[in-house]
């Protein structure tokens, strides 16, 4: 036999042996599956803020309708709503409470809790996660490790912490000193809001971005400013603005459009941004500012007292690594501090 042919056959045999060794575990797993269970999903990885709450509620529904059975072992543990002092140390399964619950002692529970009604605590509580068909009202110094969802209002007492997710179908209220990560609701209220406040109001001057130093007209509705830019007080600008440097928006001025800057952005007292506000670095809103679109920063967002973000009919997003929120701020939609968020005292 030709020596070249022999070498070719040997090479093919050698490669086939290597492939057999490499693919033997995959073939065996395909023929005899040994890992059929779904992989657990960390709360850090799901984009949908209500994903884990919705999944937990589905399990509760299935259990209550007798669709979820695992041998003779129950999937949940019932606690009576009348038990104002339950022994949480005895809890070994997720909890179901079929009516509203008003606790008179501190609660520490490391299993998810479902409440078919309202849930109130006195404070210093530690919960893993909770889903209610009514309201959630946690006293001061409380903590929710994973997530909380309420069909109605969520109230988090002062100096409390929710390092993962809070969501409500109606409203969330965070008292001063609260720490948060992702908060979502049609209305999110931070700290105490003064109802009868007055802000100086001057006549506004219609202006054009083309009057500003370094202005380059990109289109009929977009202007580029090369370098830093300072918007005077009491002006109205219509159109979108991009600034390659730092941007300062004067007190009471209005920009009816989107705003983007490469360096820091400072928005003056009682100013208004009619669209998105985006910056690679820090964004600072002073008091009584209104931003109707999303606020996005790569680093830090500071929202001054009594400011408003978004509108009820068009919820929006606030996103940064760190977010500091003053008292009386109201946001509509999602506030997401990727690293840490905090509500400041008045």
Image: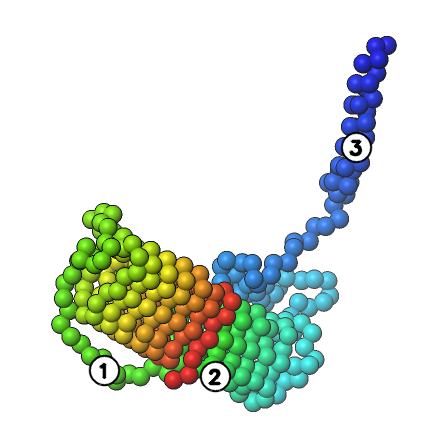
Total numbered labels placed on residues in the image? 3
Q: Nearer the viewer, mark 2 or mark 3?
A: 3
Report the residue at 24% width, 62% height from top.
Answer: 255
- The numbered mark, 2 or 3, whose residue comes first in the sequence reads 3
Task: Describe the element under mark 2 as helix, strand or loop.
Answer: loop
Q: Residue furthest top?
A: 1
Left or right of 35? Residue 273 is left
Report the residue at 64% width, 58% height from top.
Answer: 40
Task: Describe the element under mark 3 as helix, strand or loop.
Answer: helix
Crowd around label 3: few <14 · some 14–19 · many ≥20 (10 Å): few
Tell me where residue 264 appears, x and y as whole percent: 37, 64
Work out whether residue 209 or residue 288 is closer to the camera in this orientation and state it. 209
> Residue 70 bears which disc, if any?
none
- Quadrant placement of the C terminus: bottom left
Left or right of 64? Residue 280 is left
Distance in Å between CA atoms under marks 2 and 3: 64 Å
Work out whether residue 46 or residue 243 is closer to the camera in this orientation and state it. 243
Tell me where residue 80 appears, x and y as whole percent: 60, 81
Tell me where residue 306 appears, x and y as whole percent: 32, 77
> Residue 158 bears which disc, if any?
2
Residue picked out by circle 1: 198
Image height of 213 relative to 10, above or below:
below
Distance in Å between CA atoms under marks 2 and 1: 27 Å
- The numbered mark, 3 or 1, whose residue comes first in the sequence reads 3
Image height of 291 relative to 134, above or below:
above
Residue picked out by circle 3: 18
Tell me where residue 107 appears, x and y as whole percent: 60, 83
Report the residue at 18% width, 64% height from top.
Answer: 236
Q: Nearer the viewer, mark 2 or mark 1?
A: 1
């Amino acid at each position: 036999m030709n020596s070249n042919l022999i070498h070719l056959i040997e090479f093919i045999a050698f490669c086939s042996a290597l492939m057999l060794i490499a693919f033997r575990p995959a073939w065996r797993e395909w023929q005899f599956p040994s890992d059929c269970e779904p992989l657990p999903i960390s709360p850090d990885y799901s984009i949908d803020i209500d994903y884990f709450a919705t999944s937990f509620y589905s399990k509760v529904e299935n259990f209550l309708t007798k669709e979820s059975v695992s041998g003779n072992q129950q999937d949940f543990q019932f606690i009576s709503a009348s038990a104002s002092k339950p022994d949480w140390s005895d809890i070994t399964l997720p909890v179901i409470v079929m009516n509203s619950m008003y606790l008179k002692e501190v609660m520490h529970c490391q299993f998810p809790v479902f409440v078919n009604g309202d849930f109130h605590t006195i404070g210093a509580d530690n919960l893993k996660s909770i889903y209610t068909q009514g309201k959630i009202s946690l006293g001061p110094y409380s903590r929710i490790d994973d997530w909380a969802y309420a069909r109605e209002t969520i109230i988090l007492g002062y100096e409390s912490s929710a390092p993962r997710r809070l969501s409500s179908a109606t409203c969330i209220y965070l008292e001063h000193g609260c720490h948060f990560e992702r908060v979502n609701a049609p209305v999110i209220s931070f700290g105490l809001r003064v109802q009868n406040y007055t802000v100086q109001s001057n006549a506004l001057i219609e202006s054009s971005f083309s009057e500003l130093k370094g202005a380059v007209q990109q289109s009929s509705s977009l202007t580029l400013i090369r370098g830093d830019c300072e918007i005077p007080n009491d002006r109205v600008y219509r159109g979108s603005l991009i600034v390659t440097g730092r941007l300062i928006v004067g007190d009471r001025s209005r920009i009816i459009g989107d705003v983007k800057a490469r360096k820091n952005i400072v928005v003056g007292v009682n100013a208004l941004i009619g669209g998105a506000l985006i910056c690679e670095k820090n964004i600072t809103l002073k008091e009584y500012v209104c931003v109707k679109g999303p606020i996005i920063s790569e680093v830090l967002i500071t929202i001054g007292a009594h400011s408003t973000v978004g509108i009820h009919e068009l919820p929006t997003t606030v996103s940064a690594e760190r977010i500091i929120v003053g008292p009386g701020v109201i946001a509509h939609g999602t506030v997401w501090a990727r690293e840490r968020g905090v509500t400041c005292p008045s």
